[in-house]
Amino acid sequence: MSEDVAYKRIRAARAGRRFPVILEVIESGQLHLAAVVMLAPNLTTDNAAELIEAATCQSKAQVEQMLAERFPQPDLATLIEPIAAAPSSVAALELAPGPVQNVVKPAASFAGQEVSAPPAKVTPLAPQRFGLQVTIDAETQQLLEDVRALLGHTIPSGDLASVLRESLRIAKSALEKRRFAETSQPRPGRRTKSARHIPAHVRREVWKRDQGQCTFLSDSGHRCESRTRLEFDHATPVARNGETTPANLRLRCRPHNQYEAEREFGERFMAGKRERGKRRAG
């Protein structure tokens, strides 16, 4: 076992020795080891039953959110520091306090070697509060400083959390306009002879109707929660005379769009089509 796997099992065993019901819930498959590790520091004889029940059948992210609501943590300090520097020479720049505190660490190398850094992580701290830890390269750090300077009139304090929020708002608006033709001043669509062309007003209508989320439903009726890599999918394919209208279009994440195509045309056909596409792109 790796150290991480062994650690989880040791923590789970210790928690199970204190509260035997944990072992029963793990055995039933309703509670995973990661949830037990997160619950363990907060378990007492008074709250164990409630917390274990609340964590049952929940994902790791859902358990983190539940614990943040019940046991809120203080905001993190906002720091920018080179991760390759020795502890005695680390120069930390502490910014003005903001609504959400973040730790942003620019990636660096030491003695010509790349230094590994923890993966990016967003951790719930309290209701509506999250801690952010991410490693960035020199170019991203410079972009961050440039954007903070450009937002100087809007955010005079230079608060990093506020700068990130405003930057993401601007990026979201630009990406929605590019991907889904979102605009506050729509213009009449232009006609085209291509059956596969999706006019801007149709993209806007489908995106708003489907609420920017994949619409694939499992056999049990669960809707796919993906909001990334979304594509417009024809319910009746264009190859089978399907129309490019809001009624015949739906949002699908890429894996489910590919799955629908394979169900419609067969796996071998779609595999060959993807291979030809790769050759043309190459």
Image (cartoon, rainbow, N blue to C red):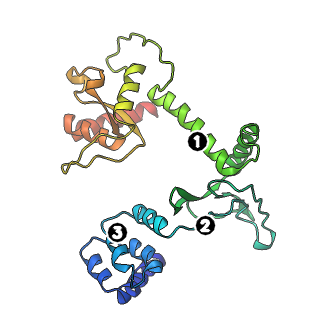
Disc assigned to residue 74: 2
Look at label 2 and name its amino acid.
Answer: Pro
Name the residue beneath numbered marker 3. 54
214 and 111: which is toward the camera: 214
Q: Is residue 104 rendered to the left or right of residue 255? A: right
Disc 1 residue type? Leu
Q: Earlier in the sequence, mark 3 or mark 2?
A: 3
Distance of label 3 from label 2 (alpha carbons):
23 Å
**Secondary structure of residue under mark 2:** loop
Q: Secondary structure at mark 1?
A: helix
Q: Which mark is residue 168?
A: 1
**Residues marked 1 and 2 touching at CB (< 8 Å):** no
| Label whose residue precedes the other's in the sequence (1 or 3) | 3
Looking at the image, residue 52 sits to the left or right of residue 37; the answer is left
**Residue at x 31%, y 38% (from the top left corner):** 257
- Determine the CA span between mark 1 and mark 2: 24 Å
Depicted 62 relative to depicted 236: above or below: below
Query: Which of the pair 102/108 is nearer the observer?
Result: 102
